[in-house]
């Protein structure tokens, strides 16, 4: 047991695991359900979905194992709630108010919002990226639909700049994928107590994304 | 059981899980040990390190559970072998023959090699990125040392271009981290039967990396 605790303390992933804020889940969930979701995020981030038991989830909030079933039908249902809400919030965070900006400023603003969201909610976002394989097919399809909407926002912004002659990229889809990768990969290493604030990272990644897409004078 | 199988078939991660080639492990390991390592890569990629049992590892190669201990002392020892060798190969893949190239061509070549390696060995690389939290502290430190060497290669190449006045970046360390992110994030989604060959992806990412760092005429 002592060994196991020492091992746990030294786990690298733990250093970048932060408890999600309760507000993330929203009024769709009762207060106990919100606490169960936050507990599940920590358990899944530490040990993975498959190695987490329903007992782990309820123990994390000081409840008996049966309390889970008042709010969720299965452990998979908890994973679905986390990944659905996580993707919904990430998509909503992109906003629908950037279409009037010029193409370069629009893309920069979308990258800023996407990166800042992923930094701020990096532990939830990590579950959204790494644990999708635990979803049942029907749930996976619903989350995949949200992912496609996020992709579409970035593809649209890149395509708009290309059409305007401001961007020059070999392939719109691949370029959008790379820009999304910048935001997604930070969930692997980001920590709120590290040197980079979500906003500083957002500004930096927006500038790098623009460098990748902007047409060069003289072609 | 039928449900569980349907679930397994539909798992998103499975679509991008490929068995590693036996040559990856090298003569350091006996043939049975190599097969156990490849089996472990598949198990860890499908279910995570914590949810994999030593029985899963040996069953994957048709051996009895006890056979593991002829070659590895623990399941963690298997994870250490995979992540150590994976990082050693990724580092070796960068080569030590790029220092005579001009800075832009050196960075492009390093990105090409890093991206192509991660695409070709994407399932092993995924374990190397996502399962480090399963390592014991001493093993983690050894792997971390290899990761720092990889970081150092990219930082050195970016810094060299900055000193030569060819690159213009706000921060060498962060820029190197973003370039590494491009290669690392593809292990999340890459599949060998997809539309992009490792080489095509390598060329594309090298071009995008250069766009991020090259100084603009006129500043």
Image (cartoon, coloured by chain):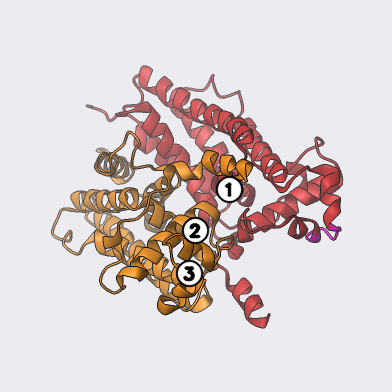
Chain colours: A orange, B red
Viewport quadrant of the C terminus of chain B: top left
When asked about the image quadrant of residue B167, the answer is: top left
Disc assigned to residue A166 = none
Q: How much space separates mark 2 and mark 3, taking CA atoms?
A: 19 Å
Viewport quadrant of the N terminus of chain B: bottom right
Task: Report x, y in % for residue B21.
Answer: 74, 49
Please tell me whether mark 1 or mark 2 is closer to you in this view: 2
Assess disc 3: are there few (<14), some (14-19) or many (≥20) residues with their C-alpha within 10 Å of its C-alpha.
some
Contact between labelled residues 3 and 1, with CB atoms less than 8 Å apart: no
Q: Earlier in the sequence, mark 2 or mark 3?
A: 2
Contact between labelled residues 3 and 2, with CB atoms less than 8 Å apart: no
Disc assigned to residue A44 = 2
- Residue span colored magenta: B59-64
Disc assigned to residue B131 = 1
Q: Is residue B165 above or below residue A66?
A: above
Callout 1 secondary element: loop
Q: Which secondary structure dominates the residues rendered in magenta?
A: loop
Q: How much space separates mark 1 and mark 3, taking CA atoms?
A: 30 Å
Is B29 left, or right, of B50 in this rendering?
Answer: right
Q: Is residue B218 above or below residue B34?
A: above
Task: Report x, y in % for residue B79.
Answer: 67, 45
Disc assigned to residue A64 = 3
Is A159 left, or right, of A189 in this rendering?
Answer: left
Q: Look at the image and say whether residue B86 sits in the magenta stretch.
A: no
Residue drawn where x is 74% and y is 48% of the image: B37
In depth, the one of A204 and B166 nearer the eye is A204
In depth, the one of B96 and B152 nearer the eye is B152
The chain letter for the residue carrying disc 3 is A
């Amino acid at each position: 047991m002592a060994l196991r605790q020492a091992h746990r303390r030294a786990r690298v992933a733990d250093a970048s695991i932060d408890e999600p804020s309760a507000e993330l889940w929203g009024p769709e969930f009762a207060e106990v359900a919100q606490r169960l979701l936050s507990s599940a995020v920590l358990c899944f981030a530490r040990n993975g979905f498959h190695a987490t038991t329903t007992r782990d989830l309820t123990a994390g909030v000081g409840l008996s194992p049966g309390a889970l079933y008042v709010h969720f039908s299965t452990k998979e249902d908890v994973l679905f709630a986390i990944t659905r809400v996580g993707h919904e919030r990430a998509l909503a965070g992109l906003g629908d108010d950037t279409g009037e900006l010029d193409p370069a400023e629009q893309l920069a603003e979308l990258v800023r919002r996407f990166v800042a969201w992923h930094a701020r909610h990096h532990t939830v976002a990590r579950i959204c990226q790494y644990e999708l394989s635990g979803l049942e097919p029907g749930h996976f399809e619903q989350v995949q639909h949200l992912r496609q909407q996020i992709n579409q926002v970035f593809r649209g912004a890149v395509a708009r700049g290309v059409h305007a002659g401001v961007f020059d990229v070999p392939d719109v889809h691949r370029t959008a994928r790379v820009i999304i990768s910048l935001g997604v990969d930070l969930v692997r290493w980001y920590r709120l107590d590290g040197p980079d604030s979500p906003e500083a990272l957002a500004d930096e990644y927006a500038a790098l994304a623009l460098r990748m897409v902007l047409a060069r004078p003289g072609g």
